[in-house]
Image: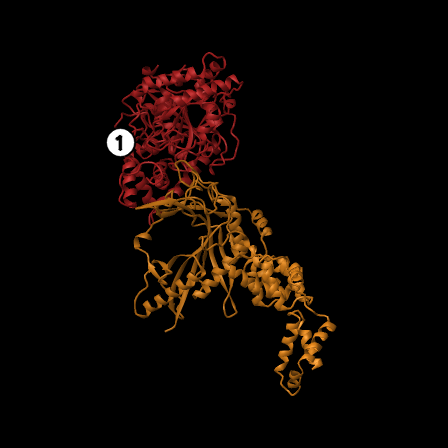
Amino acid sequence: MHTLSVSALGNALRRKEFSSVELTTHFLDRVAAYDTTLNSFITVTGDIALADAARADERRRAGEDNPLLGIPIAHKDIFCTRGVRTSCGSRMLDTFIAPYDATVVDRFRANGTVMLGKTNMDEFAMGSSNQTSWYGPVRNPWDADRVPGGSSGGSAAAVAAGLAPIATGTETGGSIRQPAALTGLTGLKPTYGRVSRFGMVAFASSLDQAGILARSAEDVALSLGAIAGHDPADSTSVDRPADDYPGALGSDLSGVRIGVVKEQFGEGLDPVVGKLVEEAIDDLERLGATILDVSLPNSALSIPVYYVVAPAEASSNLSRYEGVRFGHRAAHPVDMEDLYKRSRSEGFGDEVKRRIMIGTYVLSAGYYDAYYLKAQQVRRLICADFARAFDQVDLIVGPTSPFTAFPIGEKLDDPVAMYLCDIYTSGINLAGLPALSAPAGFARGLPVGLHLMGNHFREDLLLSVAHRYQQATDWHTRRPARFT
Amino acid sequence: MMWEAVVGLEIHAQLATRSKIFSGAPAAAGAEPNRQACAIDLALPGVLPVLNAEVLRMAVMFGLATNAEIASRSVFARKNYFYPDLPKGYQISQYELPVVKRGVVEIALDDGPTKRIGIARAHLEEDAGKSVHDAFPGETGVDLNRAGVPLLEIVSEPDMNSAGEAMAYMRTIHSLVRYLGICDGNMEAGSFRCDANVSVRRSGETALGTRTEIKNLNSFRFVGRAITYEIERQIETLAGNGTVVQETRLYDAVADETRAMRDKEEANDYRYFPDPDLLPVELSPEYIERIRAELPELPDVKRQRFRSEYALGENDARRLTAIREIADYFEAVANASRQPRLAANWVTGDLAAALHRANIEITHSPVGPEELATLIVRIADGTLSGKMAKEVFESVWRREGDPDSVIAKRGLVQISNPAAIEDFVDQIIAAHPEQVEQFRTGKEKVFGFFVGQVMKLTRGQANPEQVNQALRRKL
């Protein structure tokens, strides 16, 4: 069951080959068997899952049908789930039980999905390797000594190991696409505003966006339809109906103009990764796409801009964690300042503290213009680069990550090296564009991701091109040997 | 040495919306602590603000009423600081791009003339909650009912030069926001309060002196007294060759003085930046014009109209238009009685006094405008003397009945029949020959005695004017 696609699972449920309760039990059993190794879940919600599954079976018996009815899903522990701990990978929220569901969770539930649990993640989504989690690192199913990427590393590892058919993730600078690349999955970051942020613990509000990790573009397409669309509870969600993503699959590539970002094939890129991505681009050309060169001249500035904008917003977003109303509270505070200082010192990990410090610094009087304001100006240049490129092409391609999964422990004491994991992805978040990563081969046995970037609200085109590519290749069907 | 004071006010007017500025929780005061604080007000992880459109309408009304510029684009920013009553760790406020800029109001000075006071800006923001120090021994509680209640912060130019001008300005704004129906103006409850910026300089100087800011003044009287004290303190300091320190001060009403707050409480770098959770607010000219069309008649216009339509003097017109409900009451009485002069006298006189004694608002007056109009009609048609009218008013106030039934019940109808009056006058003259003699030999004072006797005989119901005339004739 755990090797079937979402549509195959849906067909089997429809044909009553198995029930959702049976399917859910199977996945829960796999979680129990494998997750001691992977550590991909922070909380497994077995009882809720079985109740959700029974309800889905009931709904199906009552005549209801939709592509996600009865399909298990794992939610990144950044989404609030009513009555269930929502930790965001932090000691700060280890005791926090959300009194409401995030819109994403709510919409999946309305579609009849079954919540298996909450997946591990970098603390407050700050990291690219899932090593900053209070709940310990997640291991990559392709090599348990290596990281799965981050921050949605728990979701990536769970889906890659067949512990869940699909999982939610979130991005601020590449946190869906990079782990998707490092674990051999298809991961989509939609257009900013396409999916509601309500109930998603905020990291950097102008960049955060929810998305999907799955094993194929088709599975992503089936899932995205459930959550895309306007939410009046999120002022930045766009009032524009969702497209028919599954319906957009299947078109051929003739006439599709694809631009290759020349700046993203230079220094810093693992040559084997580069070669595989180039081969994937050749495949796209063989499938009928027109390949052109495009330039994103300010591409190299996306990391410095990102590491001003994201920490600035984070420093403010994380001010609410001070031990007064919820979350970690230091024992026996002597006064208000002591309560704040110790609760935050104890509750936050090093990477979160580092970013709060950076963010506070760049917003401070005397530094605001030089850092925050300047970063916003460069951000507009980065947006303009993409806009110019999309005048010439329909899609942009490149590598998702400059390298494959690295060993656990690496880059932890070198923040700048860690930050460079997102060198190809963070520009997309700064510009609010949709992008996905799809498996494009293996380098030394480790998955490599092809990065497809689209214009605003062109998730349909991204998914359709990725789907066409996946019809012609089988990289996305490979399974890590230990988790068959 | 002559000194000149320079004063600017920052008024916080709580907007009279049903729900809060960024959440659906009720904005009304008075509930049990934290009963009106939803997940958004509590700043739980993952919640997001959504702007209440009503606050924009209200801010635009204020801007239009002060001839201000309405920004086609305004931006909410975050003002970052830590305090237990500030759940998010930042306050959402408008900073660089407020919704209202460069307005003006005209204030009336005590000695007659008016003065124009500039409004630099008015911006929208959310209120904080409050710390509760007396609920738990040794601990501080936090009540977040007020967190997220909408405020319009109205920042004046430093155009005032005395405590009196500052009070007049504050009264003018208070009247205006109540006219517009955007703020209940309840100062005791804190829904209308202000901070005052005060500096002094030598007369003739153009550069501003160092200013201090007096926080949280919540009555007209305190504004007056705090500014008066602060101006004197600064003059004394400068005259003694001292320097005024730029600082935040608090007014202590008991000691009647201002005191510097501890440095720590104000040494904040708020790290303002645009709130990425909220889109810039863009207002179309059509939207603004729609609100302009819905504006009520404003105090200045109403005052002019009262002067011309009801032939009132400037003072009466000003007193009657300062509060919209009083103006409405007056107009109802004036129109129903067709006696605007009498209506003005009664509303600013006996009615105002009675309301003041009983400490009630005119909207809750036991004597309604129709009843006061009836009473005035009875004065005008001669049924009631002024003295009798007061008695009827008192009795209607106590709800002993409407004016006509009180008049009937008490037999208070004035005797205005000339023949009847002459009859009474004849009786009195006949009964007091001695006094008649005295009067005729020039003792003018005795005249009052005859008036008193006739009134006594008629139990006060005789028309005094007619009694006077008849006595003159017959004596």
Label 1 Cα neighbours within 10 Å, binned few <14 / some 14-19 / many ≥20: some
Q: Amino acid at mark 1?
A: Leu
- Chain on which label 1 sits: A
- Residue at left offset 49%, top offset 60%: B171
Query: In x, y percent, where is residue B446?
Result: 62, 82
In the picture, the quarter occupied by the N terminus of chain A is top left
Left or right: residue B98 versus residue B138 is: right
Residue at the bottom extreme of this rendering: B441
Q: Of all residues shown, which one is farthest toward the front?
A: B431
Residue farthest top in this picture:
A17
Q: Is residue B463 left or right of residue A208?
A: right
On the rendered structure, is B177 left or right of A470?
right
Relative image position of residue A458 (x, y in whole percent) = 48, 29
Q: Colour of chain A?
A: red
Out of A438 and B436, give the one closest to the viewer.
Answer: B436
- Would you identify the image quadrant in which residue A126 lies? top left
Number of numbered callouts drawn: 1
Residue at image position (40%, 40%) is B42
A400 and A176: which is toward the camera: A176
In this rendering, does residue A470 appear at all? Answer: yes
Give the residue at x 64% y 87%.
B442
Q: Secondary structure at mark 1?
A: loop
Chain letter for the orange part: B
Residue named by callout 1: A412
